[in-house]
Amino acid sequence: MGNDPLFSLQNGSDIRGVAMGEGAALTQEAVGRIARAFVFWLSERTGKPPRELAVGVGHDSRLTADALTRAALDGIGSAGARGFHCGLASTPAMFMGTVYPESAFDGAVMMTASHLPAERNGMKFFTRGGGLEKTDIRALLERAQGEPAPPRGQAHPAFDLMTLYTADLRETIRAGVGGGERPLAGLHVAVDCGNGAGGFFVSQVLGPLGADTAGSRYLEPDGRFPNHKPNPEDAEAMAAICEATVQSGADLGLIFDPDVDRMSAVLPDGTPIARDALIAMIAAILAPEHPGGTIVTDSVTSDHLTDFLERRLGLRHHRFRRGYRNVIGEAQRLEREGVSAPLAIETSGHGAVKENYFLDDGAYLAVRLLIAAAKQRAAGRALAELIDGFVPPFEAREVRIPVRGEDFAAAGAEALRLFEERAAAAGLAIAPNSYEGVRVSDARGWMLLRLSLHDPLLPLNAEGNAPGDCASLLRTARDLLAGIPALDCSVLGSADA
């Protein structure tokens, strides 16, 4: 059963695959079958017959977006449900389609492969309870195996979901800032959408609220992504928004990924607000509303961030496993147990706020930043003052160490055991309550060694506090892992570079 080609399309809690060119796996037929299976899956979980279900489908700017969206709608219609074509949209907007009474979708599908190259596409699924989990995707694919290819070319009504969503964002800003219909008048914001779906944020949110958006770049949807990788984590992409912010004299720069569930930002002097700095900024904005709250992050956040959150803001820092669904799920678990967890956020820019359905929504994070920027400006203060006292790491590195052998999980687990044992013997501090891998630290900084879930690799993350510290930590890692036959530590041979 697991050898069916459909199963190769699973990517954790969503679907991704090559969608154009030779060897394409995410074909129109595959999408139709999976969408058809989603209807029956949704029917079982809601108790509604398919004919009573409404499912919205939207897409980002990818070249295969229209054809695959129509294939998904054909699959939904062939199962007996009502499918609605939402056109160019963001992933968070598609979830909100299950929330708004005007749309009242029972489920939603977003055609996107996030930041992946142009030849790829994918599917993200939502119910009113949030995004599907890994086990749900597996169940969909198992169901899709036996589904027929849906007939093509059915008629499906359009639904203007983005008008509802952008009106919601505008009202959130108006309520947060005050100042009437144009509360952002006088604020200059440069935006880089990477030719994805995020141009709406300029035309339908910032513009109507009075913001100056001169200097914004790459707002036009173009699935070739011709200007830079559509990824806020990419160095070239961040350099582009930093340049745009400084050259245009903007008060704030914003950059989104293609489906707008991630973002990063830039201060007026070109300083990025990304990774730990973004977490620190959003936490500082939320702290007065949630005193003593717990900020849930992924495992590769720095000790400097912990110090800022706990000593400066009076919050608690809870590091968990990597993966935005893991981080969000952990925050929701804490909330169920009575622990206030207002923010779940990864260093990748996936950030989910409790007040916003724990939805990882880059546009909503940008809205909270804009409200804070407008308030700081009105008080004669800079936005950067919110993270005064936060010390970013001097340097960060990631090295991926290959693991040999057929049972790489067992070999990797033994390597982690030896790494921890040797680190303790060498006097390194072992972090308690580590949910992922082994984290060690000393005066130079910290390292985290963990086992990849799917690949025969041990990713090693290191952050140094001063020049030379990062390279020194990697040399220490090389010594601690020396002689373990399952590991190819040659990748650590360039630790002095």
Image: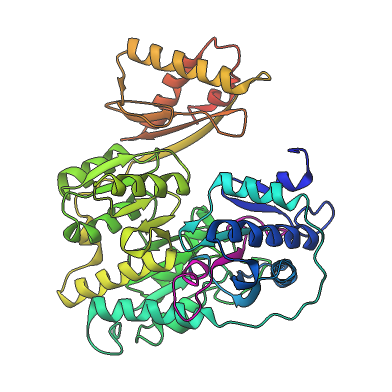
Magenta-tinted stretch: 93-120
Image position of 324 with respect to 480: above or below: below
Secondary structure mostly seen in magenta is loop
Residue 405 place in picture, x, y as percent: 67, 18
Report which quarter residue 82 is drawn in. Answer: bottom right
Image position of 155 with respect to 238: above or below: below
Report which quarter residue 4 is drawn in. Answer: top right
Q: Is residue 56 left or right of residue 235?
A: right
Image position of 416 with respect to 267: above or below: above
Residue at image location 55% in from the left, 12% down from the top: 484
**Figure colour scheme:** rainbow
Report which quarter residue 483 is drawn in. Answer: top right
Residue 168 place in picture, x, y as percent: 39, 78
Residue at image location 44% in from the left, 76% down from the top: 100
Residue 448 place in picture, x, y as percent: 41, 30
Please check the rendered image and state whether residue 96 is part of the magenta-colored stretch, yes or no.
yes
Residue that sits furthest to the bottom in the current view: 181
